[in-house]
């Protein structure tokens, strides 16, 4: 599996979640073993996660001079409060999604996916296919979502989410994590 990144967990203690993604089929599934969202210290390794202990391994990357060349990247990303335009666009997306899920007539908003508002921590997930969300037990809570990228042009890294978005969830005791992705 490829190491994607580490994310500090909320709360007073010092704990991190570590995201690993495989290159094979099944990374879109919460419990297929194609990815791992591991908590340390004191976390539990889910029974579907297996691997080997290694000092180094594949890491986050972006494309090189051609589509197939992989160049390792290291990034530090800081959270920032979104501007009013991004918040308004996100709220329109949530209203549109909720109306569609409840069978309510909605006016088509061609601007729904124009604003980049798909990577954030906290709040609620905004799935590409909200009518078929991942089956997460009610005791799990949404932690973050991470927009995929192709690693080409302006993209700082590559994540193979089929043009979609990845979603991380934490168990109620924050000792176990799950990760999946969704696309159109």
Image (tube, helix red, strand yellow):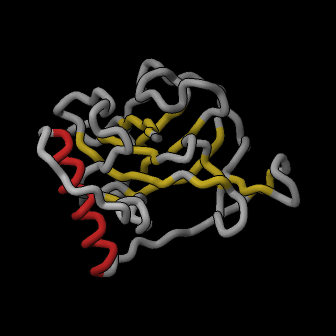
Residue 176 at what x, y percent from top left?
35, 35
Along the line of sight, the residue nearer the viewer: 65 or 32: 65
Seen as rendered, the residue at the extreme right is 65
x 70%, y 35%: residue: 54
Q: Is residue 44 left or right of residue 34?
A: left
Q: How many marks?
A: 0
Residue appearing at x 34%, y 59% in the figure:
121
Dividing the picture into quadrants, the one containing residue 27 is: top right
Q: Position of residue 128 (x, y in %)?
A: 38, 44
Q: Is residue 85 left or right of residue 78?
A: left
- Counting from the top left corner in percent of width and height, residue 3 is at 62, 45
Indicate whether 183 appears above or below 49. Answer: below
Q: Is residue 43 visible?
A: yes
Vertical position of residue 79 compared to residue 55: above or below: below
Rendered view: 79 above or below 157: below
Residue at left offset 36%, top offset 57% = 14
Which of these two is toward me, 36 or 102?
A: 102
């Amino acid at each position: 599996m490829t190491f994607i990144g580490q994310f500090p967990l909320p709360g007073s203690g010092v704990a991190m979640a570590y995201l690993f993604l495989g290159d094979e089929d099944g990374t879109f599934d919460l419990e297929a073993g194609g990815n791992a969202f591991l908590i340390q210290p004191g976390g539990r390794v889910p029974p579907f996660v297996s691997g080997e202990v290694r000092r180094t391994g594949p890491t986050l990357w972006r494309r090189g001079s051609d589509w197939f060349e992989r160049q390792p990247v290291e990034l530090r990303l800081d959270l920032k409060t979104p501007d009013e335009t991004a918040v308004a666009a996100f709220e329109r997306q949530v209203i549109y999604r909720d109306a569609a899920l409840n069978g309510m007539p909605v006016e088509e908003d061609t601007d729904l996916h124009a604003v980049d508002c798909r990577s954030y921590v906290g709040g609620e997930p905004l799935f590409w296919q909200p009518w078929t969300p991942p089956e997460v037990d009610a005791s799990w809570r949404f932690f973050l979502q991470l927009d995929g990228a192709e690693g080409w042009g302006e993209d700082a890294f590559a994540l193979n989410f089929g043009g979609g978005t990845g979603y991380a969830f934490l168990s109620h005791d924050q000792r176990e994590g799950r990760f999946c992705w969704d696309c159109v």
